[in-house]
Amino acid sequence: MKILCILPLLLFTVAIIACSGQKRDAISSGGNVKPTPPQDKGWTFEPTPVWRDEFDTDGLPDARKWGYDLGGSGWGNHELEDYTSSISNAYVKDGLLHITARKEASNGRDYTSARLVTAHKGDWLYGRFEIKAKLPAGTGSWPAIWMLPTDWAYGSWPKSGEIDIMEQVGYDPNNIHISAHCEKYYFKTNTQQTATKVIPTAITGFHLYRLDWTPTALRGYIDDELVLTVQNEGAGYTVWPFDKRFHLLLNLAIGGDWGGAQGVDDPIFPVTMEVDYVRVYKMTDK
């Protein structure tokens, strides 16, 4: 009986010693637990788009698929345009979406342009995104094909993330940028996760800009060539806010901190980004 009574006490003592050792190990290592990235399950994408716009009907962009960000607030980058919903700034003709910036006064600004968004009309968590586009030429232009969070679940920018499928500035027209921003990695601290590729015909021909987004990575492609991979480190939203739904944006900014770094050349106007199609493919869960 004495042995039976002592045995639980011995087991309890051993457990305390083990826990104390683990605590000392945690303290000696700064209390940090090494992040565990999620397992890549080899996700694929369905062959047929779940959402698409082929821009086959002339006139205003399809209101069932596109809305507008409006105004001339500078948009956090000291941009010079007033974004409108006018057909002179965004229209479909001959199978192409035209986003056109013009030199004209509007709401206290000297330029107009358009910023189309799919928010609450097309919102996705993971998927393949394909946009075929021809980029504008001219110093001062700043076109972008990108994504923002629809619900801002982790807070204001950059906490909830941003995905730049394509960015270009007119004074460096053939250098195409793909980037991702989050609380830990973003451009204002020069820590953004980014890559560039030179496309000599970016302003004279159409090219395919693509994002493959899965739980483990963002992968950016140009003409099906991998340019950027951003891995999920498994360390929470500060490095991976890309586990919430996002929507697409297509816009042509004028000037701004980056686009206007070498001024704006007024003889370029009107200047246009042309989009052949936008296609979104659902990720196949495994």
Image (cartoon, rainbow, N blue to C red):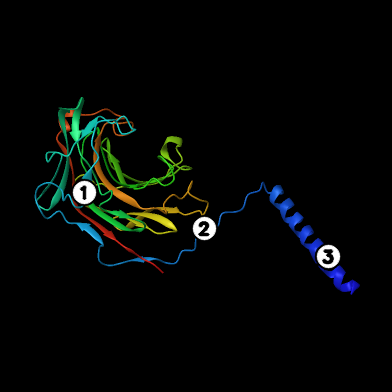
From the viewer's perspective, is 72 left or right of 25? Answer: left
Question: Which amino acid does the dot numbered 1 rest on?
Answer: Trp
Is the Cβ of the residue at disc 1 closer than 8 Å to that at disc 3? no
Q: CA distance from mark 2 to mark 1?
A: 35 Å
| Residue 210 in view | no
Look at discs 2 and 3 and give the one toward the viewer. Answer: 3
| Residue 133 in view | yes
Question: Mark 2 — residue?
Answer: 37
Which of the pair 174/121 is nearer the observer?
121
Q: In which quadrant of the rendered image does the N terminus lie? A: bottom right
What residue appears at the point 14 percent right and 35 percent down from the top-left corner? 270
Question: Which amino acid does the dot numbered 2 rest on?
Answer: Pro
- How many marks the image carries: the answer is 3
Question: Mark 3 — residue?
Answer: 9
Residue 145: x and y, percent?
A: 28, 46
Is the Cβ of the residue at disc 2 closer than 8 Å to that at disc 1? no
Residue 180: x and y, percent?
A: 40, 46
From the viewer's perspective, is 267 left or right of 230? Answer: left
With respect to residue 128, does 83 lie above or below?
above
Residue 78: x and y, percent?
A: 31, 29
Residue, far bottom: 1
What residue appears at the point 26 percent right and 49 percent down from the top-left corner? 118
Q: In which quadrant of the rendered image does the C terminus lie? A: bottom left
With respect to residue 230, does 260 lie above or below?
above
Q: Residues within 10 Å of mark 2 (few under 14, many from 20)?
A: some
Residue, far right: 2
What residue appears at the point 14 percent right and 29 percent down from the top-left corner? 104
Question: Which amino acid does the dot numbered 3 rest on?
Answer: Leu
Question: Mark 1 — residue?
Answer: 66
The residue tagged with tag 1: helix, strand or loop? loop
Q: CA distance from mark 1 to mark 3?
A: 69 Å
Which of the pair 16/248 is nearer the observer?
16
